[in-house]
Image (cartoon, helix red, strand yellow):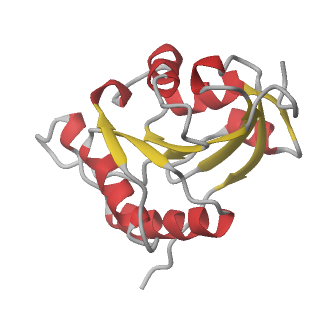
Amino acid sequence: MTARAGAGPLRRLVVLRHAKSAWPSGVPDHDRPLAPRGRRDAPAAGCALAAADPLPDLALCSTAVRARQTWELASAQWGTPPPVRFDPHLYAAHVPELLQSVREVPPEVATLLLVGHNPGLEELVLELAGEDLDDALDRVRTKFPTSAIADLTWYGPSWRDLTPGAALLTSLTVPRGKKG
């Protein structure tokens, strides 16, 4: 099944990989903060998300420090950020865990933002995308870098109905902040 009208309301899944993280000595992976570049790129990702409109109705975010900081800096670029759920299942998750968290989202949510990590997010985008409008899918296959935003759309009655190949990858952007 591919993203087509008639199978339910239009839904949008926006996948954001956390911004560039630091690697401080002796800090567990879950607790690694953003690097200076990540602190510049996360607000740029927030601006890109705002420009893409509509903003998400809900955000699901990994509990890892770098993902939480990405969310905080990105969502600070919006007038009123949507509610966020910090989900421990998103840390180091692969497709089955990511899909489980997405499928638990209430059907009233039309646009969902997922903030997490690779390789899981890249695998999820590749699993869900049945088609793309240009070379976006090839770009994801090559690399899904930090701060990358993949925008997937599909039609379905609820998030429980999201299946592999059901979505259309409409864009892939990699916002970068300016050194200042």
Q: Nearer the viewer, residue 29 or 165?
A: 165
- Image coordinates for residue 72, horizontal then vertical, percent: 33, 60
**Is 83 located above or below residue 89 in the figure?**
below
Q: Is residue 56 left or right of residue 165?
A: left
**Is 69 located above or below residue 102 in the figure?**
below
Quarter assignment of residue 40: bottom left
- Image coordinates for residue 37, horizontal then vertical, percent: 40, 65
Quadrant of the image containing the C terminus? bottom left
Residue at 69% across, 38% down = 140
Residue at 37% across, 51% down = 83
Quadrant of the image containing the N terminus? top right
Quarter assignment of residue 62: top left
- Image coordinates for residue 134, horizontal then vertical, percent: 88, 46
Q: Nearer the viewer, residue 128 or 23?
A: 128
Q: Nearer the viewer, residue 119 or 10?
A: 10
Residue at 82% across, 31% down = 3
